[in-house]
Amino acid sequence: MRFVILFGVAFLLGILMAFLEMSEPFGWIISMIVIVFLSTYLFVYPIFWEKNVKKVESYLKKRRKNPLFKLYYGMGNRIDQDVKEATEALLRKYKQPARQAMFKTLYALYENDILRAKKDIVDIRPPKYKAYYQAVVAMEEGKMEQAAKFGEQVKTEWMKHALAAAIAKKAGNHGEYVAEIQNAFEKSRGVQRYIIYKQYEVDLKVN
């Protein structure tokens, strides 16, 4: 449907440029700017900036042939077979150690296999993601001081709030936990917002 819209807009732009008798170079520039902007909105916006989790879920569900979208949708809805198949497909496709480490870590944490996650984290890049997952693993092992040290390396807002929520939950502070999860949700966008929502749906208050 998005391709139909894009081609339709391109066709209408062509007619408009001809009607206004714009010079060909200028017409091409205007058309390219509009098409690039529209393409970004239709194909990139839902993944990185969309705030409506239902729209993100719909986008992912329709594109489950893409293993990355299948992974996100599977994790969000706890579809074990989808997560397994998507992870295997991504590992076959991407051979770089850093990407392999990320997908392996995500899958290990999904299966709550902390020992496997701890081993796979080593090659994760960039450092902020590595520190985030190291903090998650440290908390699961009950090493809260170590988790806090790793957390200090994390600068992304939603990550900091997610870690703070996990620490509060471990400490039995439910009020702070809910507040921090809400903060993590509000600071996130696109797919990450969707994953946070699906993971903490019971505790989130979303209008």
Image: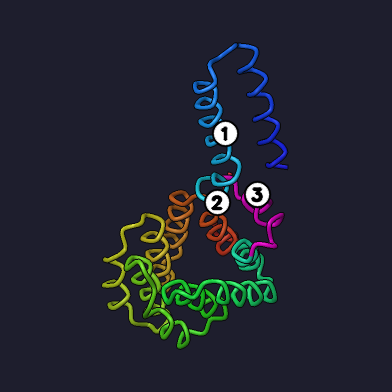
Q: Which residues are magenta?
A: 50-66
- For the residues labelled 1 and 2, the Cα–Cα distance comes to 18 Å
* Distance (Cα) linking label 3 and label 2: 12 Å
- Amino acid tagged 3: Lys
> Is residue 198 positioned above or below 85 on the image?
above
Q: Nearer the viewer, residue 41 or 155?
A: 41
Secondary structure at badge 2 equals helix
Return the residue at label 2.
47
The residue at which mark 1 appears reads as: 35
Determine whether 35 is above or below 156 in the image: above
Mark 1 or mark 3, whichever is nearer to me: 1
Extreme residue toward the top, this view: 20
Q: Give whichever of discs 3 and 2 has the lower sequence position.
A: 2
Q: Quadrant of residue 121?
A: bottom left
Residue identified by numbered label 3: 54
Q: Residue at x 61, y 77 (%)?
A: 88
The amino acid type found where label 1 is placed reads Ile
Percent position of residue 12, x then y: 68, 24
Left or right relative to 146: residue 201: right
| Relative image position of residue 33 (x, y in whole percent) | 51, 30
Q: Earlier in the sequence, mark 1 or mark 2?
A: 1
User: Up-down: is 121 above or below 38?
Assistant: below
Point out residue 149 in the picture as x, y percentages from the top left corner.
Answer: 26, 72
- Which element is circle 1 on? helix
Q: Nearer the viewer, mark 3 or mark 2?
A: 2
* 1 or 2: mark nearer the eye: 1
Asked whether disc 3 touches disc 2, contact meaning CB atoms under 8 Å apart, the reply is no
